[in-house]
């Protein structure tokens, strides 16, 4: 039984971008959870416990604001918790994450992968001949050559985590602006691994800042969301105002398996293709 709600037009657009070598993937924390990394909520809960606080005390604050408060109060202990949170579990990494990612990248054949994650799970896949870039090396000319681009960094101590980090990075960095303008204007993004709450935050910084009205073709990018997080009105808003088509899926239960099933079904619909030998985009799983 299908759990994915995707239209023929959306599939055609994704396949067309793939065929033109203009499809890139934007990966969020939900994908790393498949490998056993902690979620943002789990990490925040641990940090607040160290502060002697509870998340209920911050009902209206976004995670970056809470992280900023925890960083101020915990100093080095803050980084130790974050570092521990992004370490994958070996069994989940090898038996679940790597096989799923192999299928995903073979079926989409992305030009590059952009991620807001600071873990090294993607590097463990040996993608793009090991080409991986930190946030201070975001060169749009490298996109077509293939690589993993860590938009928020891959070093815990210099990563984009707090509200102050977000504001400084997206508003004051010309390199970031140049990189994002090139991605959003030249490539179709398939966005995977974000909850609606996480993506709404990212949308404010990226899609509202770096898309001009003329760029908001409908839809030009695609995001995978569970259907219980988004309603038809919001889907239309995403499509018409931001040029983002919503591909939704039904959760089979409360477990995380529905997300994995959705990825697998999407890959099946995209008809997996295998990169040529020697292609920089060929996936090797160690």
Image (cartoon, rainbow, N blue to C red):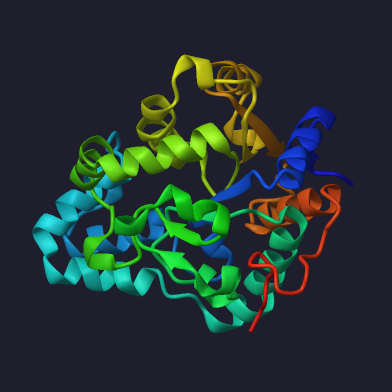
* Point 70% across, 66% down: residue: 100
Task: Using the image as rendered, state which of residue 145 and residue 237 is in the foreground.
Answer: 145
Q: Is residue 128 left or right of residue 37?
A: right
* Number of numbered discs: 0
* Point 39% across, 55% down: residue: 40
Image position, residue 80 (x, y; %): 24, 73
- Residue 4, picture quadrant: top right
Task: Using the image as rendered, state which of residue 19 and residue 37 is in the foreground.
Answer: 19
Q: Is residue 203 left or right of residue 21?
A: left
Q: Please say if 259 is above or below 123.
A: above
Image position, residue 245 (x, y; %): 65, 29
User: Can residue 245 be spotted in the picture?
Assistant: yes
Q: Please say if 286 is above or below 230.
A: below
Q: Please say if 1 is above or below 257.
A: above
Image position, residue 102 (x, y; %): 70, 68
Q: Is residue 109 left or right of residue 54?
A: right
**Residue ranking furthest to the right:** 1
- Residue 46, picture quadrant: bottom left
* Point 51% across, 52% down: residue: 143
* Point 50% across, 35% down: residue: 184
Q: Please say if 181 is above or below 31.
A: above
Image position, residue 113 (x, y; %): 55, 56
Q: Is residue 275 left or right of residue 57?
A: right
Which quadrant is home to the C terminus? bottom right
User: Can residue 56 be spotted in the picture?
Assistant: no
Task: Using the image as rendered, state which of residue 216 and residue 120 is in the foreground.
Answer: 216
């Amino acid at each position: 039984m299908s759990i994915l709600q995707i239209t023929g037009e959306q599939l055609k657009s994704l396949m067309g971008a793939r065929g033109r070598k203009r499809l890139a993937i934007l990966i969020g924390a939900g994908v790393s959870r498949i490998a056993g990394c902690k979620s943002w909520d789990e990490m925040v809960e641990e940090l607040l416990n160290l502060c002697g606080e509870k998340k209920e005390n911050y009902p209206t604050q976004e995670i970056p604001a809470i992280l900023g408060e925890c960083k101020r109060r915990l100093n080095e202990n803050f980084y130790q918790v974050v570092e521990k949170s992004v370490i994958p579990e070996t069994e989940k990494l090898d038996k679940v994450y790597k096989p799923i990612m192999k299928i995903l990248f073979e079926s989409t054949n992305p030009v590059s992968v952009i991620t807001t994650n600071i873990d090294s799970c993607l590097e463990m896949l040996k993608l793009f001949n090991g080409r991986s870039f930190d946030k201070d090396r975001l060169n749009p000319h490298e996109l077509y050559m293939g690589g993993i681009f860590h938009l928020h960094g891959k070093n815990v101590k210099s990563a984009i985590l707090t509200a102050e980090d977000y504001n400084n990075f997206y508003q004051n960095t010309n390199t970031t602006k140049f990189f994002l303008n090139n991605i959003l204007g030249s490539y179709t993004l398939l966005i995977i691994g974000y909850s609606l709450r996480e993506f709404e935050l990212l949308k404010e910084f990226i899609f509202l800042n770096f898309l001009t009205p003329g760029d908001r073709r409908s839809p030009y990018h695609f995001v995978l969301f569970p259907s219980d997080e988004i309603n038809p009105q919001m889907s239309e808003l995403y499509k018409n105002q931001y040029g983002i088509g919503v591909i939704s899926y039904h959760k089979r239960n409360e477990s995380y398996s529905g997300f994995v099933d959705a990825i697998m079904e999407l890959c099946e619909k995209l008809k997996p293709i295998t990169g040529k030998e020697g292609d920089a985009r060929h996936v090797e799983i160690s």
